[in-house]
Amino acid sequence: MTENIANYYAQIISELGEDLNRDGLKDTPQRAAKAMQFLTRGYHQSLDEVVNNAIFESDNDEMVIVKNIELYSLCEHHLLPFIGKCHVAYLPTGKVIGLSKIARIVDMFGRRLQIQENMTKQIAEAISKVTNAAGVGVIVEAKHMCMMMRGVEKQNSTMTTSVMLGAFRSKPATRSEFLNLVRS
């Protein structure tokens, strides 16, 4: 697979008018292919594999929040990066998830060709599924290179998306608590 992807990168570089025999470009198709496979490794991961049974009994039923999870993804429209942070909260109902697993779930969905709106929903639904939480809230804030480097070239724009499930959707006080804690 890597060799096929490298051949396509070689074609693209050549079509751009570059000389693939130039010193700096000799191994670029292979490096680019390996980088693309790394950046899209989320396609080869499953939720069960990522969580790896790190669900633990707990009598805590208060909100659990993980803030500022760094996030890197590729826009499915232009194959350009979007970079930002993700905030995840859930209300446990007898089980909690290992802390690092939340970040791994964010990475799994981020490491796919995505639009931010869908990724935010995928993260929320995955956390809900594995924890059986009474509610899940996810907020993603990201800068999109497709908007910064091309097109309208707006350098200071940030996109924010949120998905609220269960009590985060139905109870304004729960939603408000989450939003206030994320801002602090």
Image (cartoon, grey):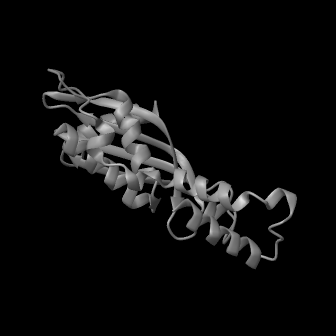
Q: Tell me which residue sits at (44%, 48%) in the image.
A: 140
Considering only vertical position in the picture, is 101 above or below 161?
Answer: above
Q: Is residue 172 left or right of residue 7?
A: left
Between residue 119 and residue 23, name the one nearer to us. Answer: 23
Q: Tell me which residue sits at (20%, 37%) in the image.
A: 131
Q: In which image quadrant can residue 31 be found?
A: bottom right
Instruction: Let me know if residue 79 appears in the view.
Output: no
Instruction: Let me know if residue 37 appears in the view.
Output: yes
Q: Residue furthest right?
A: 22
Q: Is residue 153 left or right of residue 101?
A: right
Between residue 139 and residue 96, name the one nearer to us. Answer: 96
Between residue 133 and residue 181, name the one nearer to us. Answer: 133
Which x, y percent locates residue 125? 26, 50
Considering only vertical position in the picture, is 177 above or below 120?
Answer: above
What is the count of numbered marks?
Answer: 0
Which x, y percent locates residue 17? 81, 77
Q: Residue furthest top?
A: 59
Q: Tell me which residue sits at (42%, 35%) in the image.
A: 182
Q: Tell me which residue sits at (63%, 69%) in the image.
A: 7
Q: Is residue 65 left or right of residue 69?
A: left
Which x, y percent locates residue 167? 19, 42
Considering only vertical position in the picture, is 55 above or below 132?
Answer: above
Q: Is residue 167 left or right of residue 7?
A: left
Q: In which image quadrant can residue 29 be found?
A: bottom right
Considering only vertical position in the picture, is 95 above or below 29?
Answer: above
